[in-house]
Amino acid sequence: MRRLTHNIMKTLQGRLDLASINTATLGHREPLHVSVDRIARAGFGGIAPWRHEVEATDVKQIARQIRSHGLTVTGYCRSTYLPALTKAEFTANIESNKAALRDAAELGARCFVMVVGGVPPGSRDLDAARRQVGEGIAELLESARQLNVPLALEPLHPMYAANRSVLNTIAQALALCDVADPQQTGMLGIAIDIYHCWWDPSLHASIALAGEAGRILAYHVSDWLHNTTDLLLDRGMMGDGVVDLPNLRRRVECAGYDGMTEVEIFSSENWWRRDIDEVLIKCAERLETVC
Amino acid sequence: MRRLTHNIMKTLQGRLDLASINTATLGHREPLHVSVDRIARAGFGGIAPWRHEVEATDVKQIARQIRSHGLTVTGYCRSTYLPALTKAEFTANIESNKAALRDAAELGARCFVMVVGGVPPGSRDLDAARRQVGEGIAELLESARQLNVPLALEPLHPMYAANRSVLNTIAQALALCDVADPQQTGMLGIAIDIYHCWWDPSLHASIALAGEAGRILAYHVSDWLHNTTDLLLDRGMMGDGVVDLPNLRRRVECAGYDGMTEVEIFSSENWWRRDIDEVLIKCAERLETVC
C-alpha cells in the first residue's frame, strides 16, 4: 500500500522546479531583488514574496525580474488583518487589502494569502471577529475576481487565535468559502500550511473535502519541532520535527492539488542566522528527500 | 437575553465555596500541607493537588487534612503520558497511572485528570499515538471503576500536540469516551479547561454534546493573554485576557455541569513571583467578578 501510494505520488527528487521558497524562510535580511536572483539560481521554480518587501521597491520592476527568471509567484503574503473595533478601521483594512490585491495581480501571484487577523485588542468577542472576517472576505472577493487573483484563506494554528487569526482550522475556512463563494468559482480557496494544521484530528477529512471543492490554492511546508520554544519564530526545517510530511503531501495531491510545494520557515534563532545560500541548499535537500 | 442568562447562571459572588484552587496556580513553592491550610483559610471550597506534591508526603495524612477542612478535591493532577515506542514502556505508563488512581481514591478526588501525552520522541506517527491513548484509556477505565474515581480526559491546546497531548479538542475526547464507555457509566468524561479550548470553532456545540452525555467532570479557568509570550508558563489571570469567561461558564453549567470552577494558572514570570496569599485574593476577586 505504502509502495503504491509512493509510486503515484509526484516525486520532488530532482524536481525543484515544483518547489517554491517563501522569502520569510531567508529571514528578510536582504532586498527582494537579491533574493529573487538567489532563489532562481538555486533552481527553485517559485517564490512567495512579502508585502513589506514588494512595497519597499518598484512592483513592476520586481514583477519583470521574477518573470525573466520564469519563477511562479506561488502566493503573495499577506492580507492586512480584518477584524476591527470601529467601522472606519474595518473599512481601512479592506482598502489596504484591495491595494495589496492590485500588487498581487501585477506580480501574477497564484493567490493572495489571507491571514485574517485576531480578536481586536480590547475585545473579548471571538464570534464577532469571526463574523467580520466573513464580511471582509465577501467584500474582497469582488476585487479578487476583477483582478483575477484568488483569495487563499490560511487557517492559522489555534495559538494565534488571539492576535493573528481567528481562522484556525481547514473545516472552518471551507465553511467560510462555501458561504462567500457557493458557486466554487476558483477565486476563493485555502492555503494549507502543515505547521498550522498538522495536529488537527479532522485533517485528513478536511483535506479531502477541500480538494473535492477545488479549494486548495497553496501548500506550505516546514516542520513542528518536538519541543518548540517560541510561539512564532521556532519552526523547524522539514525532517527535523514530528510531522509526517510525505503522508500529508500525498493526501493534498490525491485531493487534486497540482501546484507547488512552498517552504515557509520562521526561525529567528536557527535558520535565520545561517548563510542564506546554505539555507536554500538545505531546503532543496529536504524537499527532495523527506517531503 | 443577556440579563436573563445571567439570572439563571449560578453566581460566584460571595460563593467561593463553589470555587477550587489548582495548586499549580501557586507555583509549587511550598509543601502541599501549607497550601491546603492556606486555600481553606482563604475560603475556597476545593483544591486540586498534583502528584509530585502528594507523592512527596503521606497521602493518607494529606487526605485527612483536606477532609478536616471540608475541601473538595476537584481533580487529581495528572496522568503519566500514555504513548510509547515500546510495549514495555506503554505497560509501565499504565501501571504508573493505576498507582496514581489509588492515591486519587485515597484523596476522594472527583476525577483523575488525564493529560494523555504527545507523540513519543523519535516518532512521526500521530495517529498511532492517538490509537495508544484509546487503548490506554480502555485499560485504565477498569481500575477507575473499581476505585470509583472517574477519568477526566483533558483536551490540551493544539500547541501541545507534539510533546504533551495528542488529545486536542473536546469533540476528539468525546469520541474516545463513546468508544471506551458507550454505556455512559459516569466513570469516563472530560475536563474542560478554557485555556486549551477557547479558540475552538466547535466549542459551543461540543460543550452541549458533552453535557448531554453527562461527560463534564471538571471546569478549569484562567485566561489567554492577547500577546502570550510562552507556550507553557504565560497563562493569564481571569479577566486579563481575551476569553469571554461568563459566556463559557454559562454554557458549561447550562449543559448540566454542577461542579466547581477550578483556577489553574501557570505563570512563571508573573503570578508565581507574587506573594501567595495575594494570588489567592486576586483569584477570589476575579472569580467573583469576571468569571
Image: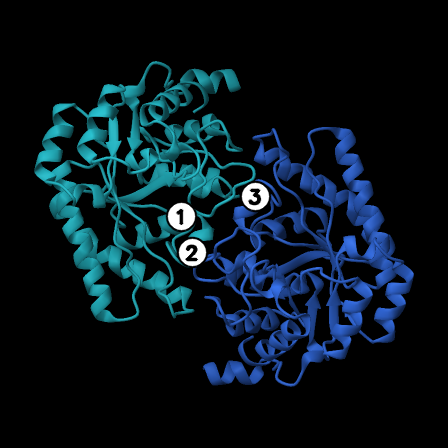
Chain colours: A cyan, B blue
Q: Quadrant location of residue B67?
A: bottom right
Residue B260 seen in this snapshot? no
Q: Residue at 81% across / 43% down in the picture? A: B96
- How far apart are the two marked residues, 1 and 2, measured between alpha carbons? 8 Å
Observer-nearest of A29 and B53:
A29
Observer-nearest of B264 and A261:
B264
Q: Is residue A108 left or right of residue B208?
A: left
Q: Which mark is residue A161?
A: 2
Q: Position of residue A222 (x, y in %)?
A: 42, 33
Give the letter of the chain under mark 3: B
Q: Amino acid at mark 1?
A: Leu
Q: Residue at 44% across / 30% down in the picture? A: A237
Residue B246 seen in this snapshot? yes
Q: Amino acid at mark 3?
A: Ala
Q: Position of residue A254 (x, y in %)?
A: 39, 28
Graded by Cα atoms within 10 Å as few (under 14), some (14 to 19) or many (20 or more), the crowding at tag 3 reads: many
Instruction: Please state, as top left, top right, bottom left or bottom right, where the N terminus of chain B lies in the image.
Output: bottom left
Q: Which residue is mark 1?
A: A156
Query: Cβ–Cβ below 8 Å for labels 1 and 2?
Result: yes
Give the letter of the chain under mark 1: A
Q: Secondary structure at mark 2?
A: loop
Do dots 1 and 2 share one subunit? Answer: yes
Q: Which residue is mark 3?
A: B161
